[in-house]
Structures are given as C-alpha cells and as structure tokens.
C-alpha cells in the first residue's frame, strides 16, 4: 500500500495506460473487455480519491510530488505534482471515465476492444497533462492526447468523421507547434525544462509578448476561443457519444488549464498587454456561440455551440485577472464538464433509439419518456445557470469578478455584455426543451420509445447529484483551489497596476493620459509605447 501512496500520481496517471496495453494484448472478447475497462477506470477513480482526501487545502504549492531525472542529468525530468487546480480537473477526469465507458455498452458495437483501449490511453494523456510539472513531459502528454482522440472520431464517428478528425488534428497540431517553439526558447534561456525554472526567468518585454502569443494560440485552439472554434462543432457532431462527452467534459478544459497554469504566470507582461483583447474575444464567443446555437436544427450541434459560449465565460473569468473571476473560471470548468457531459449523454440516448438528432423529429417526448425528460430538464437548468445548481455558481462568480476587475478597461461593460449570453443561453436551451419534450406527440415513430434503462440511470445519476452538491456547497471546490489560484496569480499581481476610474491606468511616477489601460510597473517607457 505504501508503494502506491508514495507514488500515487504515477499510479493515477498510468493505471489507464496499463489497462489499454492489457486490452490490446489480451482483450479478444467484447464482454470481458468491457468489464475489464470499466474495472480499470473504477480503480483509477478510487486511487484518485486518495488525492482528494489527503490534499492539504492550507497549502498553495504542489503536493504528492514525484521527481526523477530523465534526460540530460536532470535538465528534463519526470516531474509530477498536484495543486488545487490540478486536483479538481484530475478528479473530474477520473470521475467521468467509468461513466463514459458504461455509456458505451450498446452504443459501441464494432471494434470494442480497440475503442476501449484508445479511451484509456486518452485518459492517461489527459491526467498527465494536468499533473506534469516538467514542460517537455507536459508537451508529451498534450500531444499524446491527439492520437486516441483522432481515432475515436475517425473510426467510430458519423458520416463525415474523417473530415472532422483531420480538422481537429490539424487545428490542434498547428497551435502546438508554436507552443513547442516557445518551450524550446525558454529551455535555452533557463537550461532546464522545469516549470519553476521557467517561472524564475526575467524575460524582457517583447519576448514575453511573443511567447504569450505562442502559448495562448495553442491553448485558445483547444478551448476553443472565437474565432478558432470552427473545429469543435464538427468534432462534436461526428464523434460518438463517448467522444463528445470526453471532449466537452475534459479535453476543452486542457486549453483553459494551460492558460492558467502556464501562459498567465510565465508571461505577466504579455497577459497585461493582451488581456483586453482576449476578454473581448471571450465576450464575442459567449454571444456568438449562443446566437448560433439558437438556430441549430440538430440537438447535438446546439449543445456543441453552447460549449463555445460557456467556455467563453471561463476565459473571461481567467482574464479578469482577479482571484474571484479566476476561481469562478475554475469552478465553471467543473460545472460545464458535469452539465454538458450529461447533455451529450442524454442526446446519445435518444439517438440510439431514433437514429436522428433533428429537433423537428421530436415533440411531446415527455409523454412517453418522463424519466428521460426529467433528467434532460435538470441538466438543461444546470447548463443555463439556475440557482442551486453548479452552473450558477460558476457564471455568477465570473460575472462578479469581471465586473469588479481593476485591471480591465471597460470591465463593467464586458460583464454586462457577457450577462446577455446567460439570457440567450436560457432562451435557446429552454426553447429546444419545449420543442422536444412538450406539446403534442405528433410523430408516430416516437410513440413506443422506451424510457431510460437502469444502466442509463446509473450513468446519469452521479452527474446530476454533483450538479446539486456543487450548486449548494461550492466551497467543496473553491476551498481546495483558493490558495493555488493566489499562487498562480502572484507573478501577475507584481506587474499589474489597478485601472483608474477615469478609464486610464495609473502609471507609477506619472505618465501620459490616454496610455494603454493595463500597464506594468517595471516596463520601460519605450516598451509601453
């Protein structure tokens, strides 16, 4: 037992990989392969609970640290660590794993062993991304994620699956190349791939601008931030249900996690320079995603565009540059993973029965599938931010953090515009629910549809329970992440100057009126121009 607890991060990260290898080597029959994969994911979840119950929220630094020299006498190391931010995202990943595998019992009928192996491989890559503290190790996990996701979409997806898989791969790969260049530049400056070594660098202003842009591009594509979002609806629509759930539940969070963990603390002057523009893109994404979702005839595509809107809220919270907004952003990552993951699972349920996702094909489903309609309604209300459910806490905290931000120009205007996205989100989601579930049962094809099976209920109930738990007791998560957020923001707080009420930044020692709205304490006047 001590061997496991002493290396708990390694076990949590690589147990799914061991399961994937075992499936490839021995899992010839479908039934045992499914049971084995489910057992592996459950074991991984149980192991990850050790992190939750033994995590010390009174510390903001990394815990359960494992570090072994890997390449070049320790210049590159196998270095894992877990702070509050990594903790909640790793738990989200291991929590969703068994539920996703259980949801595939009837949905995936061909090449079952290969699908399950790819999914377990994907889980290792996602966990490694959240826990790695060596930048080369992080990049290995970040890129490794592409391979299983490409095959999951490309083999088990819909009619345009190859197009969607290739588009997803190219978009993500292009952004990652720029980040790799930035990582190599920082390595040659510091002589080590350790994240702490990168944080200790004193980079000049222009270098920070270029490096922030390189890292941000990679992360913005993964989120995705408007206008880099076009791969997401295609990937969601063509992916199998399990692929959509893991995309919405975890993969998109890798982008916002990367912004918070790497781009923001490493390049505070770049953050200060680009924060207004990024915030504007986030607000555009919130409103654009909601407006496009409003006109979608396909339920799954509607939920996909809602993700563009919701992740816009997360980015806005992160770039409010205060602890309240950032905490809201982290909480919203978790809330979105639960609610949107549940919605994609529910869309998959109806698709298995009718083999269509067109809203016009339904109507009055609540008459024949009352339990399904109840679950769908709860997930919808969580998605649109009903008080008492997890989505409300995230969105409210983000809007409050943005509204009170001292570092963004026109912060209050941005918060008000973002709030219109909440209204639009409620409108398009509830309108979709009204058309699908209420009114007259007009289509004869829907009259004999079976309600949720026990397996589907088992998959959905844990998600719905935690929507309520986090909505009523948000401190369960916020207390874990508070000090970690403060530590990540510390390099920024040393650089940023509060924005004055007149609309211009206060420049220490005096400065010209009308200067950029976010300025830096230690920048040269030449750089500011």
Image (cartoon, grey):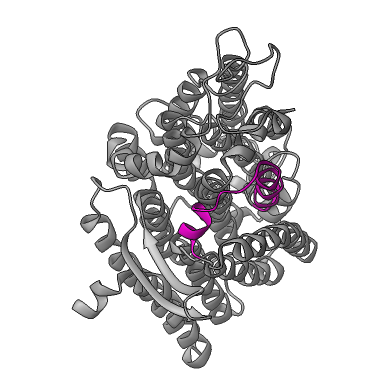
Residue 497 screen position, x and y as percent = 53, 24
**Left or right: residue 473 compared with residue 212:** left
Q: Can the viewer see residue 158 in this picture?
A: no
Residue 109 screen position, x and y as percent = 58, 74
Against 26, is 106 above or below? above
Name which residue lies at 55% across and 24% down. Answer: 407
Residue 48 screen position, x and y as percent = 31, 63
Name which residue lies at 70% across and 29% down. Answer: 528
Provide the residue span drawn in magenta.
194-218
User: Where, quadrant-wise, is the N terminus in this rendering?
Assistant: bottom left
Name which residue lies at 66% across and 30% down. Answer: 290
User: Where, quadrant-wise, is the C terminus in this rendering?
Assistant: top right
Q: Residue 41: name its quadrant.
A: bottom left
Q: Nearer the viewer, residue 167 or 322?
A: 322
Q: Nearer the viewer, residue 500 or 387?
A: 500
**Left or right: residue 81 compared with residue 268:** left
């Amino acid at each position: 037992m001590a061997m496991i607890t002493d290396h708990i991060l390694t076990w949590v990260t690589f147990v799914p990989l061991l399961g994937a290898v075992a499936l490839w080597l021995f899992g010839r029959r479908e039934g045992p392969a499914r049971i084995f994969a489910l057992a592996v994911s459950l074991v991984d979840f149980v192991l990850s609970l050790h992190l939750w119950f033994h995590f010390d929220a009174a510390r903001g630094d990394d815990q359960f640290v494992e570090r072994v020299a890997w390449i070049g006498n320790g210049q590159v190391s196998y270095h894992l660590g877990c702070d509050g931010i990594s903790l909640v995202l790793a738990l989200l990943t291991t929590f969703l794993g068994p539920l996703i595998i259980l949801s595939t019992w009837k949905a995936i009928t061909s090449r079952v062993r290969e699908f399950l192996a790819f999914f377990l491989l994907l889980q290792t890559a996602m966990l490694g991304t959240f826990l790695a503290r060596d930048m080369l190790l992080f990049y290995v996990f970040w890129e490794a994620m592409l391979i299983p996701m490409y095959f999951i979409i490309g083999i088990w997806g819909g009619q345009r699956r190859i197009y969607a898989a290739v588009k997803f791969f190219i978009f993500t790969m292009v952004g990652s190349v720029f980040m790799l260049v930035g990582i190599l530049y920082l390595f040659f400056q510091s002589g080590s791939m350790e994240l702490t070594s990168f944080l200790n660098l004193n980079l000049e202003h222009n270098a920070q601008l270029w490096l922030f842009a390189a890292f941000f591009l990679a992360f913005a594509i993964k989120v995705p931030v408007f206008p880099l979002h076009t791969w997401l609806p295609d990937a969601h629509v063509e992916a199998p249900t399990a692929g959509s759930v893991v995309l919405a539940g975890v993969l998109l969070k890798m982008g916002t996690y990367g912004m918070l963990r790497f781009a923001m603390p490493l390049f505070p002057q770049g953050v200060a320079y680009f924060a207004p523009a990024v915030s504007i893109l986030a607000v555009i994404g919130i409103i654009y995603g909601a407006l496009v979702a409003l006109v979608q005839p396909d339920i799954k595509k509607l939920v996909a565009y809602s993700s563009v809107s919701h992740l816009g809220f997360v980015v806005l919270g992160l770039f409010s540059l205060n602890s309240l907004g950032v905490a809201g952003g982290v909480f919203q990552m978790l809330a979105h993973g639960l609610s949107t993951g549940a919605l994609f699972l529910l869309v998959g349920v109806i698709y298995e029965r009718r083999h269509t996702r067109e809203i016009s094909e339904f109507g009055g489903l609540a008459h024949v599938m009352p339990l399904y309609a109840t679950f769908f309604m709860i997930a919808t209300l969580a998605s649109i931010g009903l008080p008492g459910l997890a989505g409300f806490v995230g969105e409210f905290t983000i809007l409050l953090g943005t509204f009170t931000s001292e570092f963004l120009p026109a912060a209050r205007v941005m918060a008000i515009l973002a709030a219109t996205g909440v209204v639009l989100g409620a409108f398009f989601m509830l309108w979709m629910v009204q058309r699908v579930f209420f009114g007259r049962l007009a289509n004869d094809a829907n009259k004999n549809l079976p309600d949720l099976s026990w397996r589907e209920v088992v998959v959905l109930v844990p998600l719905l329970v935690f929507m309520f738990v986090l909505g009523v007791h948000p401190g369960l998560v916020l207390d874990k992440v508070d000090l970690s957020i403060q530590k990540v923001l510390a390099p920024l707080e040393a650089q940023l100057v509060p924005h004055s009420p007149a609309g211009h930044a206060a420049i220490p020692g005096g400065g010209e009126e009308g200067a950029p709205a976010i300025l830096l304490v230690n920048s040269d006047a030449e750089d500011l121009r």
